[in-house]
Amino acid sequence: MLRKIIAALILVPLAVVIIAFAVANRQTVTVSLDPFSGAEPAASVTLPLFALILVLLLVGVVIGGAASWLRQGRWRGAARRLERDLRELRQKFEAHGDATAVPQDGIPPARLRLRPPAR
């Protein structure tokens, strides 16, 4: 519930700012993708200025997200490898009949728990 309230407190003012920005920047602009012909570009797009800025912002977010995802690839691979190794080790322990040696819920058995340091 608190998360929804915080999201609303952030998203509603952001939506108001974006709508005000769109209303203030309705003039059309022509974006030319032809570097050789300024008068008669072979590839050009005419759209409102706010749409151009929002599209460029969206493209930047997508490129940044993709770069982040690619940089974290080795960590995801290591996590998959470690999870696979853990599954194999659990299966080996269960095959030997010593299933109590591997905690299922993440809490170590009583004989492996450490006592807090004495003061």
Image (spheres, rainbow, N blue to C red):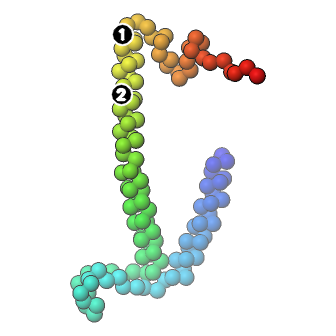
What's the amino acid at mark 2?
A: Arg
- Tell me which residue sits at (35%, 32%) in the image: 81
Relative to 37, 50 lies left or right: right
Disc ID at residue 54: none
Q: Quadrant of residue 56?
A: bottom left
**Tag 1 secondary structure:** helix
Within-10-Å neighbours for mark 2: few <14, some 14–19, many 20+: few
Disc ID at residue 95: 1
Q: Is residue 56 above or below residue 91?
A: below
Task: Give x and y (percent) for residue 85.
Answer: 36, 25
What's the amino acid at mark 1?
A: Ala
CB of mark 2 within 8 Å of CB of mark 1?
A: no
Front residue of this view, candidates 47 and 34: 34
- Tell me which residue sits at (58%, 11%) in the image: 111
Relative to 21, 56 lies left or right: left
Task: Quickly name the residue at label 2.
Answer: 84
- Tell me which residue sits at (28%, 93%) in the image: 39
Front residue of this view, candidates 12 and 112: 112
Task: Give x and y (percent) for residue 25.
Answer: 51, 82
Front residue of this view, candidates 88 and 41: 88
**Direction right: furthest residue:** 119
